[in-house]
Amino acid sequence: MKVEVITLFPEFVEQVTRFGMPRIAVEQGQLALSTRNPRDYSTNKWRRVDARPYGGGPGMVMEAEPLAAAIDAARASLGAAKVVYLSPQGSRFDQRWAERLSAEPGLILLCGRYEGLDERVLEAEVDFELSLGDFVLSGGELAAMVVVDAIARLLPGVLGDEQSAVNDSFSAGLLDHPHYTRPEVWRDAVVPDVLLSGDHAKIARWRRQQALGQTWLKRPELLDGLELDEDSRALLRDFIAQQR
Ligand SMILES: C[S@@+](CC[C@H](N)C(=O)[O-])C[C@H]1O[C@@H](n2cnc3c(N)ncnc32)[C@H](O)[C@@H]1O
């Protein structure tokens, strides 16, 4: 998959492929990340890409033309690619979005700065407007890096164990089950017996119940959107009874 990030801070965004799963994705040839600076498409000698807003008010707005030229160049380089604007006004980026975007052959991630982009760029060029959440960042770069990270780990073969993405929170609509590792006793707290039993069917059932239970405890609204089978409902009832 090819991703190009349009940003005023290319060196910042490029850091995302130096670590963790994005780095592995690049090393495996599953991800190619490049950056493009709108300043390279500015037509003034100061390389300015922002101007004061029409109608007055505080701050600066990113001008349409350098951004559109950068997007055109990115399209010419990537071929088929959706354009995503990272913005606090967008749809909430979540695991469904990560899955959807990871299936695209190419993506152009557009990072705003200042008060944001001239609205006409959004109307003319942007396929999806995505937000990290209801807060305002000073620029779209961290959001683009989050999107790259979330996508990279879904690309084929990037996670060592394919099953770990399947069990991850949100993949099947539930939160992940709890995890434990050595030592068996830590500050008097013990690992649940079932995990030491070697009985894989029992362990799988316990993990399913814990995933249901953790979701009920921490994010109960996620359960509203799920059609649980009778066995899962019984596991959840049992988990809830154990909390009382
Ligand atoms: C200071 S913000 C502009 C905020 C804009 N004036 C507003 O209130 O909607 C500058 C840039 O940061 C990015 N940004 C800010 N918050 C974000 C969020 N929650 N998710 C994704 N990108 C965000 C966007 O690219 C935005 O253009």
Image: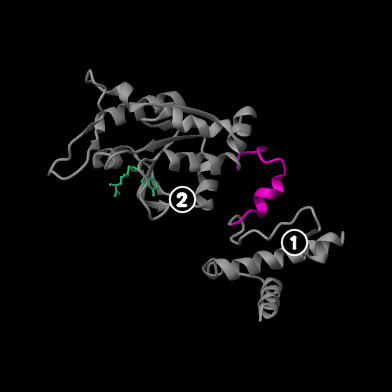
At x 69% / y 74%, what residue is drawn? 239
Residue most toward the top? 45
Q: What amino acid is at disc 1?
A: Arg
Q: Considering depth in this image, is 31 or 139 the residue closer to the camera? A: 139
Residue annotated with mark 2: 93
Q: Which mark is residue 44?
A: none
Residue 226 seen from this side? no
Q: Along the horizontal axis of the image, is 239 left or right of 86?
A: right
Decide: is 214 above or below 126: below
Q: Residue 187 carries which label?
A: 1
The x, y position of residue 35, in whole percent, is 44, 27
Whole-number angstrom distance, CA of label 1 to CA of label 2? 38 Å
Residue 220's image quarter?
bottom right
At x 60% / y 41%, what residue is drawn? 153
Question: Looking at the image, how many numbered discs can be counted on the residues?
Answer: 2
Magenta range: 154-169
The x, y position of residue 3, in whole percent, is 49, 32
Q: What amino acid is at disc 2?
A: Phe
- Label 1: few (<14), some (14–19) or many (≥20) C-alpha neighbours in 10 Å: few
